[in-house]
Image (tube, grey):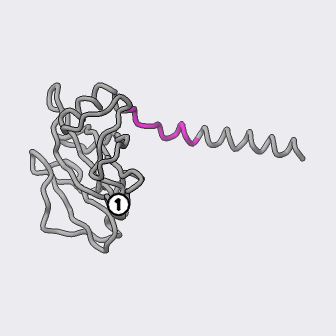
């Protein structure tokens, strides 16, 4: 019996390794880029890389490489979450986020919001549209205007929001 369990465990480990290699993980955001981004956002990190959130709690930001296509291309999404007071700080959403684009040797902010960051399959000027998810039935649509993202007059439904890539997942 133990032999069968061991064989099954090895098979599961091999399969999960095969699935993991089928979808490679995005490379981590370099430490120098993290430091530059936090400097741009005027959020000085402490020695452990933590920053102060809206509730005056030290938290470790999360960083995601995202590709928005078109003239934006690669960008970095920075999520500053809540700490122990998350519900009183950010409500039902994970925190505040900042979308940063490299411009030469520096970064600049092209979008910010509070909630779940969603990259939609639709595009404007070749750049993916964005939305902010959270509790509700309809959600704002943000489109690229050539410089940054601006609110559209349209709202999107839960079903349309579900077609996008959500951060954090």
Furthest-right residue in this view: 1
Magenta region includes residue 22: yes
Q: Quick one: label 1, few (<14), some, or many (20+) residues within 10 Å? A: some
Count every numbered label the image shows and give the total.
1
Residue drawn at x 22%, y 40% as measured from the top left: 100
Closest to the observer, 144 or 78: 78
Task: Judge whether 145 appears above or below 14 on screen.
Answer: below
Task: Judge whether 111 appears above or below 157 on screen.
Answer: above
Furthest-bottom residue in this view: 137
- Residue at numbered disc 1: 93
Residue drawn at x 38%, y 56% as measured from the top left: 85
Q: Position of residue 114 (x, y in %)?
A: 26, 57
**Residue 61 picture quarter:** top left
Dominant secondary structure of the residues highlighted in magenta in the image: loop
Q: In screen coordinates, is 149 left or right of 34?
A: left
Closest to the observer, 53 or 110: 53
Task: Judge whether 33 appears above or below 117 on screen.
Answer: above
**Residue 44 picture quarter:** top left
- Please, what secondary structure does the residue beneath circle 1 have? loop
**Residue 65 picture quarter:** top left
Residue drawn at x 26%, y 37% as measured from the top left: 74
Magenta region includes residue 169: no
Q: Position of residue 11 (x, y in %)?
A: 72, 41
Q: Position of residue 125 (x, y in %)?
A: 14, 49
Residue drawn at x 24%, y 46% as measured from the top left: 98
Q: Position of residue 17 (x, y in %)?
A: 61, 38
Furthest-front residue in this view: 56
Task: Please give the range of residues in magenta.
Answer: 19-28
């Amino acid at each position: 019996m133990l032999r069968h369990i061991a064989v099954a465990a090895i098979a599961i480990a091999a399969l999960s390794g095969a699935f993991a290699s089928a979808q490679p993980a995005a490379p981590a955001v370099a430490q120098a880029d993290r430091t530059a981004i936090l400097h741009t956002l005027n959020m000085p990190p402490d020695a452990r890389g933590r920053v102060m959130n809206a509730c005056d709690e030290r938290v470790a930001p999360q960083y995601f490489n995202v590709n928005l296509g078109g003239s934006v291309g690669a960008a970095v999404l920075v999520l500053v979450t809540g700490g122990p007071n998350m519900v009183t700080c950010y409500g039902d959403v994970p925190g505040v986020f900042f979308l940063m684009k490299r411009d030469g040797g520096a970064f600049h902010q092209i979008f910010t919001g509070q909630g779940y960051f969603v990259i939609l399959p639709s595009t404007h000027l070749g750049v993916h549209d964005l939305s902010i998810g959270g509790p509700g039935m309809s959600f704002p649509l943000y489109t690229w205007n050539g410089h940054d993202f601006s609110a559209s007059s349209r709202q999107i439904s839960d079903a349309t929001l579900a077609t996008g890539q959500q951060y954090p997942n």
